[in-house]
Amino acid sequence: AQSVTQPDIHITVSEGASLELRCNYSYGATPYLFWYVQSPGQGLQLLLKYFSGDTLVQGIKGFEAEFKRSQSSFNLRKPSVHWSDAAEYFCAVGASGGSYIPTFGRGTSLIVHP
Amino acid sequence: DTAVSQTPKYLVTQMGNDKSIKCEQNLGHDTMYWYKQDSKKFLKIMFSYNNKELIINETVPNRFSPKSPDKAHLNLHINSLELGDSAVYFCASSFGLGSNTGELFFGEGSRLTVL
């Protein structure tokens, strides 16, 4: 079975600073990997996803993530954070092929200081 | 138009009551899900339906009963509510299982508070 670890429960950054949110996954084959964002009182929205090919994927709102098979990681990055990026971020892993049900990490809460 | 809509958005009720949450998607997806998000934001899959057929039923008390009258709707009925049922319940949908998109589209959530 697949699993996801997001080691940081909270991350605090200053507006304009760079951001990296960590995600490690466990899955026997090539995973499908996702990052979702949840703004307060809202549902989750997909930021980006990796299925195959280029290991650096670009998403919406200026986010990118890099798949590193050797480290079983899929970290999310943004070069310059805006106050509106404050939200909960979830990494998710899905099985490639067959019955696909994504498993979510427990989320990282991003706090942005002015 | 909202792609995945849930009603009600907020629900406050007493222990022992029965309540339902409704979900509708207008995306033409084949698969729908219910997730439970606890107070620590942890998201746990509860059920998944594909073309009105139950395919995933995680370890959920049988007080929870999903119903899918058609592939655009997935409702959740909860009997004999308990304090521990307090959570935010998210409905989601996607293209069919095993598809190579994998993206879930979420509703805004239904916050259930059991007193």
Image (cartoon, rainbow, N blue to C red):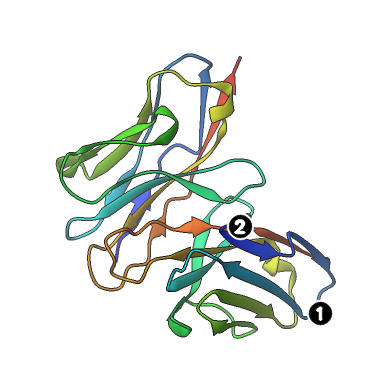
A76 or A48: nearer the eye? A48
In the rendered image, which residue does mark 2 sit on? Answer: B38
What crowding class fits label 2: few (fewer than 14 Cα within 10 Å), some (14-19), or many (20 or more)? Answer: some
Residue A96 lies in quadrant: bottom left
Q: Which residue matches tag 1?
A: B17
Q: Residues within 10 Å of mark 1 (few under 14, many from 20)?
A: few
Secondary structure at badge 1 equals loop
Where does the image place residue B36, in percent across and percent down from the top left? Answer: 57, 63
Left or right, A63 with reference to B12: left
Q: Quadrant of residue B77?
A: bottom right
The quarter of the displayed image where residue B64 is located: bottom right
Chain letter for the residue marked with disc 2 in the picture? B
- The image shows residue A36 at horizontal and vertical percentages of 45, 45
The chain identifier of the residue carrying mark 1 reads B
Residue B43 appears at what percent x and percent y? 52, 58
SS at mark 2?
loop
Amino acid at circle 1: Asn
Instruction: Identify the amino acid type marked 2.
Output: Asp
Above or below, comparing residue A13 to residue A60 in the picture: above
Q: Is B26 in front, or is A20?
A: B26
Per the model, the C-alpha gap separating discs 2 and 1 is 20 Å
Q: Position of residue B56 (x, y in %)?
A: 43, 78
Question: Which image quarter is the N terminus of chain B in?
Answer: bottom right
Give a yes or no on whether discs 2 and 1 share a subunit: yes
Q: Residue at x 77, y 81 (%)?
A: B18
Q: Quadrant of the C terminus of chain B?
A: bottom right
